[in-house]
């Protein structure tokens, strides 16, 4: 699979943390026996869940990195790191394998640096984020996370100790990054490439041998979705190349 560039890390990270918090407090739904069974597989011999590992954030410095003179704060890093760690820790209860915290910290910092480089580039190129653009993104994020309104989205953000002002700033940064990425020049996928992607999907389904999976639509019926996926993958690759170029040209110091 192609690499995926993690943008809007702050926004996505806090939302993931809020969603995990909501899920842990809710009552189990009917039909949840499959997931419960999976969790029971990770239970110890006495039938108890393994103890949830804790995120190690004791030695996080006040400034985790400097990117072309702009500081990335330890406070922001901790919020993002803890949200990602919580997701992996929940998985570890089923697998029994604790997250590699050193590796996760490195990935978190790399994502923050990549985000900052893209944001700086967007500003240097003169992109601007209107209030309407920001409001639209917040509403879109609320809907994609199953929330009924932007206000509910903001409440989930604030429950994690953030402010509505910080949410707005995060969303504004993401709008700028989105504009930069959408402006990247990419080649349109050829008919041959689209058919190759489709054939790979068909082969993967046949290899799985699952009779319960729905039959894939024909290439003609799926063409629009396949083209959208191919374009998205190409844009992700172009964004990764851009970040690597900005890294090589930038002045970056890390302090973790």
Image (cartoon, rainbow, N blue to C red):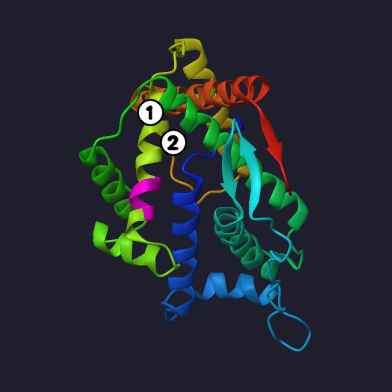
Residue furthest to the bottom in view is 46
Main SS of the magenta segment?
helix
State how far apart marks 1 and 2 are (Cα): 8 Å
As drawn, the label of residue 216 is 2
Q: In this rendering, would 169 be left or right of 63?
A: left
Place residue 36 in its image quadrant: bottom right
What is the quadrant of the N terminus in the image?
top right
Question: Dot 1 lies on which element?
Answer: helix
Q: Is residue 129 visible?
A: yes
Q: In this rendering, would 107 be left or right of 72?
A: right
Indicate which label's residue lies in the foreground, 1 or 2.
1
Q: In this rendering, would 240 be left or right of 147?
A: right
- Residue appearing at x 36%, y 21% in the figure: 126
Residue furthest to the front in view is 69
Q: In this rendering, would 52 be left or right of 30?
A: right
Q: Earlier in the sequence, mark 1 or mark 2?
A: 2
**Residue, disc 1:** 222
List x then y, in percent, for residue 68: 59, 30
Q: Which residues are magenta?
A: 166-170
Q: Tags 1 and 2 in contact by the CB under 8 Å rule?
A: yes
């Amino acid at each position: 699979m192609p690499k995926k560039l993690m943008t809007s890390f702050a926004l996505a990270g806090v939302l993931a943390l809020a969603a995990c918090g909501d899920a842990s407090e809710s009552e189990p739904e009917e039909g949840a026996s499959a997931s419960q069974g999976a969790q029971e597989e990770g239970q110890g011999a006495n039938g108890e869940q393994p103890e949830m590992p804790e995120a190690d954030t004791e030695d996080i410095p006040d400034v985790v990195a400097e990117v072309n003179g702009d500081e990335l704060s330890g406070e922001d890093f901790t919020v993002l790191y803890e949200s990602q760690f919580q997701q992996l820790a929940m998985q570890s209860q089923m697998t029994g394998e604790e997250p590699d915290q050193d590796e996760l910290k490195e990935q978190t910092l790399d994502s923050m640096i990549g985000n900052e480089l893209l944001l700086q580039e967007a500003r240097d190129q003169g992109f601007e984020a209107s209030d309407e653009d920001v409001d639209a993104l917040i509403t879109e994020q609320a809907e994609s996370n199953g929330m009924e309104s932007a206000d509910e989205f903001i409440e989930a953000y604030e429950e994690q100790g953030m402010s509505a002002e910080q949410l707005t700033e995060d969303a504004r940064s993401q709008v700028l990054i989105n504009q930069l990425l959408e402006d990247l020049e990419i080649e349109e996928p050829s008919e041959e490439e689209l058919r190759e992607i489709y054939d790979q999907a068909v082969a993967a389904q046949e290899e799985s041998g699952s009779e319960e999976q729905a039959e894939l639509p024909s290439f003609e019926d799926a063409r629009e979705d396949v083209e959208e996926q191919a374009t998205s993958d190409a844009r992700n690759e172009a964004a990764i190349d851009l970040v690597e170029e900005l890294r090589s040209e930038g002045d970056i110091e890390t302090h973790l």
